[in-house]
Image (cartoon, rainbow, N blue to C red):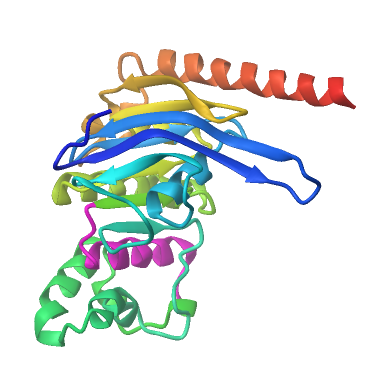
Amino acid sequence: MAEHSSGLIIDGVSMRFELPNGGHVQALENVSLQLEPGDLLSVLGPSGCGKTTLLNIVAGFLSPTGGQVVLNGHRVHGPDAERGMVFQQGALFEWMSVRDNVSFGPRMKGQTEKDYGQNVDHLLDVVGLQDFKEKAIYELSGGMQQRVALARCLANDPDVILMDEPLGALDALTREKMQGLVLDLWKETGKTIILITHSVEEALLLGARLVVMAPRPGRIHKEYRLPFAELGVGGDLRAVKKSAGYEEKREEILSMIWEMEEEIMGRVEGAA
């Protein structure tokens, strides 16, 4: 796969973990994807298909044992501010205020209040936390904490936002509101977003592109290009779920993943 000057290229990425007993686990094998700036990609698959491993390689937390990740024409060798991560649990500084959490990255870069203040306040407005900016993180609900995590990520102005099950710990109503917020932020900022999820519904709603991964070794099984994310921007996500083709795609992908899960269980039982 050729290197482009802009966009994200995952080029033949493989990952093999060596085990203490001399064995190994092939977590990923020859995974290739090309994302243009502003792409919104959701990644689905059964447990053990290497979704989080792939995300950690793109983030620079892990070095692949084969292949490479290229962003904007240069190879990824480690963590960098051009790639921002939002975890399932916000990984926030509990004792700091909301505003201090969001401005943490710019302050670490040596920026002053004059440099970052207006942007931080704008982001707090966008995620609906302007009235809570002086609250400590421990005073906030889980949904509010994830809003802080999103704003903090955006304050660093990354080219790519990586989300590892960012809404998985939220109740259903809060999760739906946050899904709408992610779509609005995607459209407003034009950022490239990769989101890992176990929820087929969430993957359909938050993936203009959707990749289903198969185990093991983890590899791309099927890719879809879908209209539902665009339909959901600024709209009613429940109405989107009733739109043409949504239910059909949901059932198709669910069946695909169930078949993979059954195959995995069959392998485990056969080895027992």
Image-based side of 175 in relation to 179, left or right: right
Q: Where, by quadrant of the figure, is residue 125 drawn?
A: bottom left
What residue sits 49% from the left and 19% below the top? 253
Residue 155 image position (x, y, % from top left): 23, 67
> Does 237 appear above or below 212?
below
What residue sits 60% from the left and 27% below the top? 215
Image-based side of 7 in relation to 138, left or right: left
Of 202 and 39, nearer the camera is 39
Task: Using the rendered image of the protein, determine whether residue 223 is visible from the camera's viewpoint.
Answer: yes
The residue segment tinted magenta is 140-159
Task: Using the rendered image of the protein, determine whether residue 204 is visible from the camera's viewpoint.
Answer: no
What residue sits 51% from the left and 42% below the top? 65
Residue 264 image position (x, y, % from top left): 71, 24
Image-based side of 222 in relation to 131, left or right: right
Q: Which quarter shows the N terminus?
A: top left
Of 80 and 188, nearer the camera is 80
Residue 148 image position (x, y, % from top left): 35, 67
Q: Judge whether residue 155 is colored magenta.
A: yes
Of 257 and 139, nearer the camera is 257
